[in-house]
């Protein structure tokens, strides 16, 4: 008998001896008078055994059979060893047709000696920022360098954009490294699929914020520094950038990557995916939809704040370079020569300052003001760098430079034209 049952037995004996009333005994036991009468009747009929629960010692009616137990432990050891308890429970239901509670799966795994995938530490006290009320008010994005395909494969960067109000993944893609191309790709995908967000919450990565101390003559005269390539695209789309001062400040996207390094890495290994191209197809076809169904929340307000994409979206979300047309009406960037056709009435653009754009599909466009004056075939997009130009060697002013072949330490890989 348990301590509670022994206490009840003593109270019933006091009732039989006439020392207390049955009502007083019921109050001391924390039960109603009717329930106290039932307990007294059981004691009279069965003695102390009447206070013991009838199901004690009997096997549970909902316990799992030995065959299911062995099947679960076999799957856990042979196929789903890299999945955490919750993820494994979901896979059992979705792929194996075995529906168990997460706690049952946890007990089976711990009982067989399988340790949890990662240990939990006591959380520090932090004040959580309230989510935005509407979808589209704020987008969060970041990149996570990690050995996504296993310790025997080189690391790459998973770049993700998330809606703050719902926690929904808006776009995600693997790239060789975190850089301007990846952020522009995410921005274009979100603009095409959802619209333009009001603001974007981001860290101080060099692709997002100028971290150098150089000011060109033009910047000093203008009183502001030229933004990064991604920053210029945000300005063109009227998206307000908000910079986090610490990793904890962007905790939502950091926790997202913790979940993805757990779940996504396990599913990539389970499906035998070890290359970026295959992984990107898996993201688009399966994982993002399943993740959003599992983790996305409802916004507090049903109205959405996405803005309709403006015209010339491809031009605004692209790499931008300033150039001067040569005397032979050509523009040269990193060994690429673009011919400028004659203008109206045979006009020559020699010595004119033009804007050169490389679109995300690698194609080149040259603009004089708002007028498109030249095109060029697609070439491999490269991460732009800021470097001294020949014109401003004495003043130490820098501008964005496109290099067809860059030194090894400036990049870790190349992009495929994944438009």
Image (cartoon, rainbow, N blue to C red):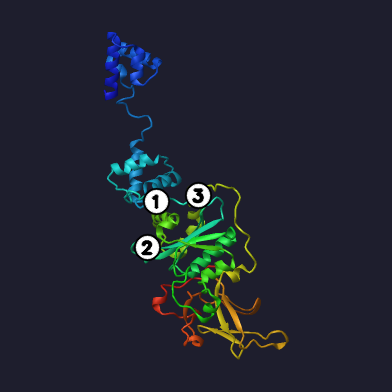
Judge by depth and name the residue closer to the eye, 224 or 85.
224
In this view, the mark in front (2 or 3): 3
Callouts 2 and 1 close, C-beta under 8 Å: no
Which residue corresponds to the image point at 37% horizontal and 62% vertical from the top-left? 147
Judge by depth and name the residue closer to the eye, 354 or 218.
218
| N-term-proximal mark, 2 vs 3 | 2
In this view, the mark in front (2 or 1): 1
Question: Where residue 85 sits: x, y (%)?
Answer: 37, 46
Callouts 3 and 1 close, C-beta under 8 Å: no
Screen quadrant of the N terminus: top left
Give the residue at the far top of this rendering.
18
Judge by depth and name the residue closer to the eye, 392 or 419.
392
Residue at the spot of label 1: 126
| N-term-proximal mark, 3 vs 1 | 1
The 10 Å Cα crowd at callout 1, few under 14, some 14 to 19, many 20 or more, is few
Question: Where residue 4 sits: x, y (%)?
Answer: 29, 23
Residue at the spot of label 3: 296
Residue 315 sits above or below residue 62 on the image: below
Give the residue at the far right of this rendering.
345
The 10 Å Cα crowd at callout 3, few under 14, some 14 to 19, many 20 or more, is some
Q: Which mark is residue 64?
A: none
Residue 243 sits above or below residue 342 on the image: above
Residue at the spot of label 2: 147
Tell me if residue 417 can be seen.
no
Screen quadrant of the C terminus: bottom right
In this view, the mark in front (3 or 1): 1
| N-term-proximal mark, 2 vs 1 | 1
- Real-space CA distance between mark 3 and mark 1, rounded to the nearest whole angstrom: 23 Å
């Amino acid at each position: 008998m348990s301590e509670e049952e022994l206490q009840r037995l003593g109270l019933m004996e006091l009732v039989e001896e006439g020392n207390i009333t049955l009502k007083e005994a019921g109050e001391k036991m924390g039960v109603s008078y009717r329930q106290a009468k039932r307990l007294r009747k059981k004691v009279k009929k069965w003695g102390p055994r009447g206070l013991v629960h009838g199901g004690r010692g009997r096997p549970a009616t909902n316990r799992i059979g030995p065959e299911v137990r062995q099947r679960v432990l076999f799957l856990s050891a042979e196929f789903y060893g890299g999945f955490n308890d919750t993820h494994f429970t979901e896979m059992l239901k979705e792929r194996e047709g075995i529906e168990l509670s997460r706690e049952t799966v946890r007990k089976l795994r711990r009982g067989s000696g399988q340790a949890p995938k990662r240990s939990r530490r006591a959380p520090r006290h932090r004040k959580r920022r309230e989510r935005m009320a509407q979808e589209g008010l704020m987008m969060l994005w970041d990149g996570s360098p990690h050995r996504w395909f296993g310790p025997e494969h080189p690391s790459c960067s998973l770049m993700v954009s998330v809606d703050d109000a719902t926690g929904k993944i808006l776009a995600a893609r693997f790239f060789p490294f975190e850089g301007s191309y990846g952020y522009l790709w995410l921005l274009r995908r979100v603009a095409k699929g959802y619209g333009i967000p009001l603001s974007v919450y981001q860290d101080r990565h060099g692709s997002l914020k100028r971290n150098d101390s150089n000011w060109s003559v033009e910047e000093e005269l203008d009183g502001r520094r030229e933004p990064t390539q991604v920053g210029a695209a945000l300005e063109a789309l009227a998206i307000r950038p908000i910079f986090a001062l610490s990793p904890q400040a962007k905790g939502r996207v950091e926790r997202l990557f913790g979940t993805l390094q757990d779940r996504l890495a396990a599913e990539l290994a389970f499906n035998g995916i070890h290359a970026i191209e295959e992984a990107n197809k898996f993201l688009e076809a399966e994982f993002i939809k399943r993740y959003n169904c599992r983790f996305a929340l409802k916004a507090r307000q049903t109205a959405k704040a996405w803005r309709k994409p403006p015209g010339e979206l491809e031009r605004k979300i692209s790499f931008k370079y300033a150039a001067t047309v040569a005397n032979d009406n050509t523009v040269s960037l990193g060994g690429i020569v673009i011919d400028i056709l004659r203008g109206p009435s045979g006009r020559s653009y020699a010595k004119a300052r033009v804007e050169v754009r490389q679109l995300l599909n690698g194609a080149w466009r040259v603009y004089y003001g708002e007028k498109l004056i030249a095109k060029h075939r697609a070439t491999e997009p490269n991460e732009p760098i800021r470097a001294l130009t020949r014109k401003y060697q004495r003043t130490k002013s820098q501008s964005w430079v496109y290099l067809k072949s860059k030194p090894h330490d400036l990049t870790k890989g190349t992009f495929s034209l994944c438009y």
